[in-house]
Amino acid sequence: VKLVDLRFEERGRVVLASLDGEVDMSNAEALRKALESNMPNDALGLVLDCTAVRYLDSAGIHLLFKLREQLRNRGQELRLVVPGNAPIADVLALADIPAAVGVADTVEAALDGMEPAADGESAPG
Amino acid sequence: MARKDEETSGEAFSQPGEGQVFLGTAGEAARLSPEQVAQVYRVGDPALSELPLEPLLEELLERIRAMLRVETTAILLIDDEGRELVARAGKGLEEEVERGVRIPIGRGFAGRIAAERRPIFIADVQHADVLNPILREKGIRSLLGVPLIAEGDLAGVLHVGTLTPREFTNEDAALLQLAAARAAPAITRARLFDALEREHRGAVALQRSLLPDRLPEVVGVSLAARYLPARDEVGGDWYDLIELQHGRVGIAIGDAAGHGVRAAALMGQLRTALRAYAVDGHEPSEVLARLDRLLRAIRVRGMATVAYGVLDPETGVLRLASAGHPPPVLVPASGKPRLLEAPSAPPLGTLAFSRYVDREIRLAGGEGVLLYTDGLIEVRGESLSEGLNRLLGTIRPGSSPETICQDVMRNLIPEGGAADDVAVVMCQSTPIPEKLDLRLPADPAVLAAIRQTLRRWLREVGADDDEVGAITLACGEACANAIEHAYPPVDSSFELEAFAGKGVVELTVRDMGRWREPRGENRGRGLTIIEAIMDELEVKPTKEGTEVLMRRRLGAGA
């Protein structure tokens, strides 16, 4: 069994990736590559749902910072979904993640405002 | 029967005429010469009945060819559906078998013999209604065929042919019919045996291929399992051990009703489906409800009893649901084993609306649960409770699952094998020592196992959910550091000790490498995390490497 499960969905022009499991130095790098390689060029951003992540250590924190950098270089935004009572909420706070990456309680809240309000033709921000 | 057929057009088959129906009776045989009688008896040689189907057919054809002095002989057997004849053996007509010639009952030479259950003689094949082109291609001129009938059932057709025109006589036909009458039961028996043998081999292979070839290794749980096919048949029993997300393990046992390939195939479908639902993370009761729906969708008449449980090694909590399966046995670390009466629910596939319920029990260290199929406890002429009592009496609490499975199979399976197949699977919550003292390879892959063990240990020493999460994280950071520091050729292993006393948890991580100042923000972050979580942190150089000592008081709040 894989330590962590990763599933992708498309929500309009935003990629929603859901993580389930644990992130440590044994899988963080592979996870980052999987996330990056599944980002189409025309995607506006990535919402990473960490609701079901029950362990994430400094290797995971590193992954999040690096992922944010990579996406930013491509003009794409990273947002996290981490409910306040999530097992990893404390470690994210310790590492100042909420100051660097948008964190929302729910997937809907994270998606909100990422898609341009007008439909269709508007150019990516 | 064999009427000499002079017709060259239209109905080319002979019709039975007055006094021309040959029956394989003693009276008819009495008209034969002693030599002919001896030949007929050679066809019914009891020694032949020992032969498997293929050699039996070959031998029969050889003897018949010699008896009637013909160039070709062939046997076609009726297929399982009873609609077609299939060429199974031939002398001088091997192509017929190689090409798998099939003749519909009622059509052509052999088909008519089968449909009308009487001998047919064709004097001139070239001008007769013969379906099988091989007969013409081989240049056969005359044919004589008789039905093979055993106990009133048509088994097939036996025919002989010549490459020069020949008028088969009534005696020839009588001889062939007698030979057929004597050969048919042996053919039927050999065929049945062959089919059973093939089915059995197939079913055994299927069953074997469906059972796990190795058991998963899950931290905090000991697992063992056994499967034993029935003495002479394959059944639909199975067990499964499934690694699930979050270090949990799924334990399944089931019994698809019936025997043979059908039961084994149903078992295979249910096993695969159970695995799929289990891996998706459903509760045991939900897995059973889905299986029940699936069974209805794939098969009208199929039934199975199943028990499925999910064990969380970290907490020892086992959630278990049963669909009409015999009650699991709770095996304590000491004391008497007892039956766990799961909330009763009917077997899968029996009621239109079934409701399955989860039962939750907590396994303390050393406690386990044994699941089994009814073949283990059912003995003909004995009540079920006798079998259950024998099972309970066989289990020695405190033994490993491996030993318990072995004992159970050794003591409850009669010599020479069981009448029904038997599956047994056991999980046991591994006893956890008061003090952890682990030596581990410096490989990132061990981190998950360390967390799994430590969480379990922390719960045993009284840590609450938040403390388990936080201390596990701090320990994970220290261990990751040790792994990063282990460079070959230095001994690439490290040690972890965990000890609790007076409400304080003390963890020590010792590596054999030189402590390096944290490089980059990543490792610096690890240290920050440890400092934030633990009350005390000491990093000391030792003779061999570095020791990281961490302490935290439990129950103090975060």
Image (spheres, rainbow, N blue to C red):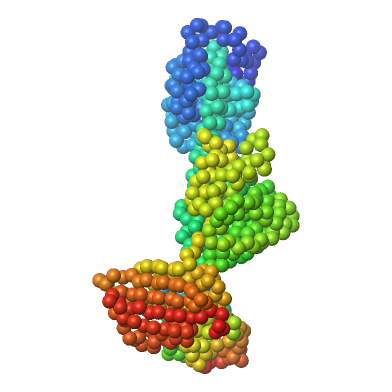
Residue at the spot x=53%, y=61% of the render? B365
Residue B298 can be seen, yes or no:
no
Residue B413 is situated, as x and y percent measured from the top left of the image, at 55, 39
Residue B276 is situated, as x and y percent measured from the top left of the image, at 56, 61
Residue B18 can be seen, yes or no:
yes
Residue at the spot x=61%, y=27% of the render? B154
Please say if B325 is above or below B218.
above
Residue B280 is situated, as x and y percent measured from the top left of the image, at 57, 66
> Is B507 situated left or right of B150 in this image?
left
Give the image quarter of residue A30.
bottom left
Give the image quarter of residue B78.
top right
Residue at the spot x=59%, y=58% of the render? B274
User: From this viewpoint, which residue is outermost toward the front?
Assistant: B502
Figure label count: 0
- Specify the quadrant that holds the N terminus of chain B: top right
Q: Nearer the viewer, residue B96 or B124?
A: B96
> Is B339 situated left or right of B541 in this image?
right
Q: Nearer the viewer, residue B536 or B466?
A: B536
User: From this viewpoint, which residue is outermost toward the left?
Assistant: B489
Residue at the spot x=49%, y=37% of the render? B100
- Specify the quadrant that holds the C terminus of chain B: bottom right
Give the image quarter of residue A115.
bottom right
Q: Nearer the viewer, residue B288 or B482?
A: B482
Please say if B548 is above or below B51.
below
